[in-house]
Image (spheres, rainbow, N blue to C red):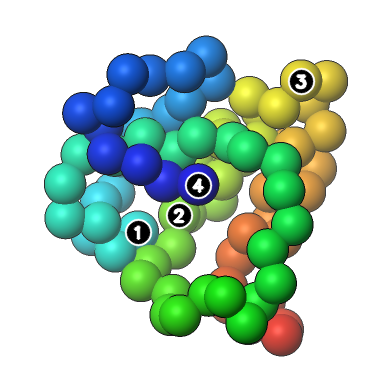
């Protein structure tokens, strides 16, 4: 999830460096939370984190398993 950088940081939070391509207008934090969200609840995509930022977020998952799956966060992939 992405939240405002004004929130207290959690361990593993990363800060996107390219706010514009991510569709963000203010400093933010990428916070990894493991959950399932039905695509019907996604109103619209506002942007994309680039590959290095997705990888950095995935590295914060204990055991490093998130890095292997970071590309699943890319809305350009089929089915998005």
Q: Position of residue 54 (x, y in %)?
A: 56, 45
Give the secondary structure at mark 4. loop
Crowding near pointer 3: few (<14 within 10 Å), some, many (20+)? few
**Residue that label 4 marks:** 1
Using the image, determine if residue 49 lies above or below residue 55: below
Please tell me the numbered disc located at residue 49. 2
Relative to 9, 41 lies left or right: right
Camera-nearest label, 4 or 2:
4
Earlier in the chain: of badge 1 and badge 4, it is 4
Camera-nearest label, 1 or 4:
4
Image-quadrant location for residue 71:
bottom right
Q: Going 55% across and 51% down the picture, which residue do you hit?
A: 51
- Of 53 and 39, nearer the camera is 39
Question: What is the spatial separation of the Cα atoms under label 4 and label 3, in whole angstroms?
Answer: 16 Å
Q: Going 60% across and 65% down the picture, which residue do you hit?
A: 74
Does residue 21 appear anywhere in the picture? Answer: no
**Residue that label 1 marks:** 22
Question: Is there CB contact under 8 Å for labels 4 and 2?
Answer: no
Q: Position of residue 60 (x, y in %)?
A: 63, 24
Earlier in the chain: of badge 4 and badge 3, it is 4
Using the image, determine if residue 53 lies above or below residue 19: above
């Amino acid at each position: 999830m992405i939240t405002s950088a004004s929130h207290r940081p959690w361990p593993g939070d990363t800060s996107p460096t390219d706010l514009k391509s991510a569709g963000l207008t203010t400093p933010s934090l990428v916070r990894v939370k493991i959950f399932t969200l039905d695509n019907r609840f996604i109103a619209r995509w506002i942007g994309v984190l680039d590959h290095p930022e997705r990888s950095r977020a995935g590295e914060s998952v204990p055991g490093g398993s998130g890095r292997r799956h970071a590309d699943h966060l890319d809305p350009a992939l089929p089915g998005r």
